[in-house]
């Protein structure tokens, strides 16, 4: 119970720290009008869920479902589902850091899946569903470690965050029918029972970051 009963002050300081990371990034980009889009690759269970969330984030330019972190070239969905290729289902998120800073991208990531479960999200189990951040730069690695540490100390979860933070190597785009899956299959049972609740959670927690 002591882990859960953190003081209001502790929580306030934690959220203030994340807000500071976000604001510093915004100010840095505001000074550089020639900023470029950035890319991050995220695994958090089924990629249909993660894609549906980031499609709704203001400042996100493009979200693509695919596979990363494995040892097999050009894997198919069927290959990845065996768990033998080493790949995780991921989304590659291209975003404008002048609109949404990387720290906020990560806060959304951590709070819309269970980062205390490494290889399972709900009924989806296996290394292909692992919780993992594939960073594309040393700066992304630094911020990811900072945000992970802050949230670990926040007491939002009774268990420690086990999300892996690994260097990005290769991304393989998933088959066409996986792209925009939730938007194209909203009435499908999995979308109704699994994806939609996560989307609703995101919309409730991050109202200020919804696309208009």
Image (cartoon, grey):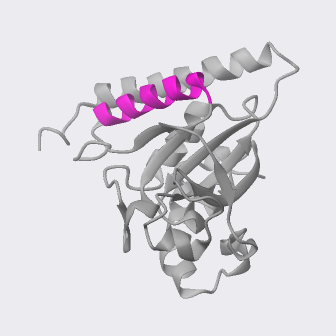
* Segment tinted magenta in the rendering: 137-153
Q: Name the residue at 62% across, 33% down.
A: 136
Q: Farthest residue to the top: give it.
A: 31
Q: Farthest residue to the left: give it.
A: 1
Q: Main secondary structure of the magenta part?
A: helix
Residue 111 screen position, x and y as percent: 45, 49
Residue 107 screen position, x and y as percent: 50, 40
Residue 26 picture quarter: top right
Left or right of residue 58: residue 157? left
Q: Name the residue at 52% across, 50% down.
A: 69
User: Relative to 108, is 145 above or below?
Assistant: above
94 or 84: which is nearer to us? 84
Residue 180 picture quarter: bottom right
Residue 131 screen position, x and y as percent: 43, 52
152 or 199: which is nearer to us? 152
User: Relative to 97, is 78 above or below?
Assistant: below
Residue 96 picture quarter: top right
Q: Name the residue at 37% across, 49% down.
A: 115
Q: Is residue 138 magenta?
A: yes
Q: Quadrant of the N terminus?
A: top left
Q: Is residue 173 magenta?
A: no
């Amino acid at each position: 119970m002591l882990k859960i009963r953190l003081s209001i002050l502790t929580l306030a300081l934690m959220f203030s720290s994340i807000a500071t990371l976000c604001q510093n990034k915004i100010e840095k980009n505001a000074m550089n009008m020639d900023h470029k889009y950035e890319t991050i690759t995220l695994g958090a269970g089924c990629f249909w869920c993660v894609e549906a969330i980031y499609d709704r984030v203001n400042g996100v330019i493009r979200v693509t479902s695919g596979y990363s972190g494995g040892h097999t070239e050009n894997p198919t969905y069927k290959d990845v589902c065996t768990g033998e290729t080493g790949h995780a289902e991921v989304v590659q998120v291209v975003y404008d850091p002048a609109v949404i800073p990387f720290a906020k991208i990560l806060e959304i990531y951590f709070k819309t899946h269970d980062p205390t479960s490494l290889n399972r999200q709900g009924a989806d189990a296996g290394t292909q569903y692992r919780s993992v951040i594939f960073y594309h730069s040393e700066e992304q690695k630094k911020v990811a470690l900072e945000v992970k540490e802050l949230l670990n100390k926040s007491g939002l979860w009774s268990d420690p965050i086990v999300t892996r933070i690994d260097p990005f190597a290769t991304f393989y785009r998933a088959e066409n029918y996986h792209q925009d899956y939730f938007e194209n299959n909203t009435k499908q049972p999995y979308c109704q029972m699994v994806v939609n609740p996560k989307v609703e959670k995101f919309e409730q927690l991050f109202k200020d970051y919804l696309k208009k």
